[in-house]
């Protein structure tokens, strides 16, 4: 009887442990990651309506874009950190060559404090100068109307102002203030076709000096995003 009681107790404890383990790795319901800029080298856009996560890292040596579903997960090896994301990264110039990235935060106040990127796909030509993990402090929050981060492909791209919405909309060429090649721009949410010229993307960017800028840029003047992660 004594052994039977011990066996039952052990089974009960094991069942409790398994229940706790399952609860520990259950994905959180809501995302707490919001669009922002980190340490002047990382730009992250969290589109909560479209459930998409995108970003761009560029410190002058290490450079990659990334994207995926804005769906929180728990990383087994870092579940104490809580909410995390699994996305794909790529060099903007070679989007067909991709690697896995884990996005999480080790701060007490989560992503409002800092963000960490870990390269789960191992060493690649793109990440060879990045190390195995990058951790950065949040510098600025960005508007919820920014739904994606894209990278400028062309030097001195033409930027247009929307003069009059309609079908087709009337655009006017800006004569100065364009984003630099290889820089990050924020894609702005469009609410109607009249405000969304076909073949153009509504962007905002932040020059090194002066106020933020905005306008419409041709889609082909931005690096392409792999269709698998759009």
Image: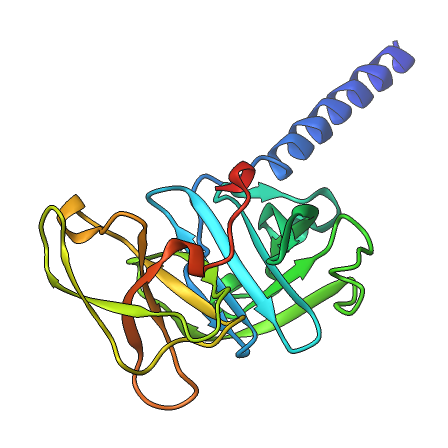
- Residue 8 at x, y percent in the picture: 79, 15
Q: Residue at x 61, y 54 (%)?
A: 103
Whether residue 3 is situated above or below residue 168 in the rendered picture: above
Question: Which one is nearer the viewer's eye here, 154 or 59?
Answer: 154
In this view, the residue farthest toward the bottom is 209
**Quadrant position of the N terminus in the picture:** top right
Question: Which one is nearer the viewer's eye here, 215 or 169?
Answer: 169
Residue 60, image quadrant: bottom right
Q: Residue at x 26, y 47 (%)?
A: 198
Please indicate whether residue 175 sits to the left or right of residue 179 in the image. Answer: left
Please indicate whether residue 154 sits to the left or right of residue 188 in the image. Answer: right
Which color scheme did the rendering employ for the protein? rainbow
Q: How many marks?
A: 0
Whether residue 194 is situated above or below residue 38 in the rendered picture: above
- Residue 201 at x, y percent in the picture: 32, 56
Please indicate whether residue 54 sits to the left or right of residue 105 in the image. Answer: left
Q: Residue at x 67, y 44 (%)?
A: 75
- Residue 109 at x, y percent in the picture: 50, 65
In this view, the residue farthest toward the right is 3
- Residue 150 at x, y percent in the picture: 46, 59
Whether residue 186 is situated above or below residue 69 in the rendered picture: below
């Amino acid at each position: 009887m004594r052994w039977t009681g011990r066996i039952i107790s052990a089974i009960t404890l094991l069942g409790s442990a398994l229940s706790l383990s399952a609860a520990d790795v259950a994905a959180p319901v809501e995302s707490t990651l919001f669009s922002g800029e980190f340490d002047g080298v990382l730009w992250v856009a969290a589109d909560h309506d479209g459930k998409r996560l995108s970003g761009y890292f560029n410190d002058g040596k290490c450079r990659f874009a990334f994207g995926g579903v804005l769906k929180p997960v728990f990383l087994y090896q870092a579940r104490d950190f809580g909410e995390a994301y699994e996305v794909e990264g790529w060099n903007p110039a070679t989007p067909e060559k991709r690697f896995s990235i884990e996005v999480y935060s080790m701060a007490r106040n989560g992503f409002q404090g800092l963000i960490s990127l870990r390269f789960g796909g191992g060493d690649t030509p793109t990440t060879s100068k990045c190390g195995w993990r990058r951790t950065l402090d949040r510098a600025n929050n960005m508007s919820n109307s920014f739904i994606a981060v894209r990278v400028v492909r062309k030097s001195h791209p033409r930027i247009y102002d929307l003069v009059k919405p309609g079908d087709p909309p009337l655009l006017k060429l800006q004569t100065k203030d364009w984003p630099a090649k290889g820089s990050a721009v924020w894609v702005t949410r469009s609410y109607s076709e009249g405000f969304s010229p076909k073949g153009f993307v509504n962007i905002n960017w932040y020059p090194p000096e002066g106020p933020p800028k905005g306008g419409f840029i041709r889609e082909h003047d931005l690096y392409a995003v792999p269709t698998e992660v759009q």
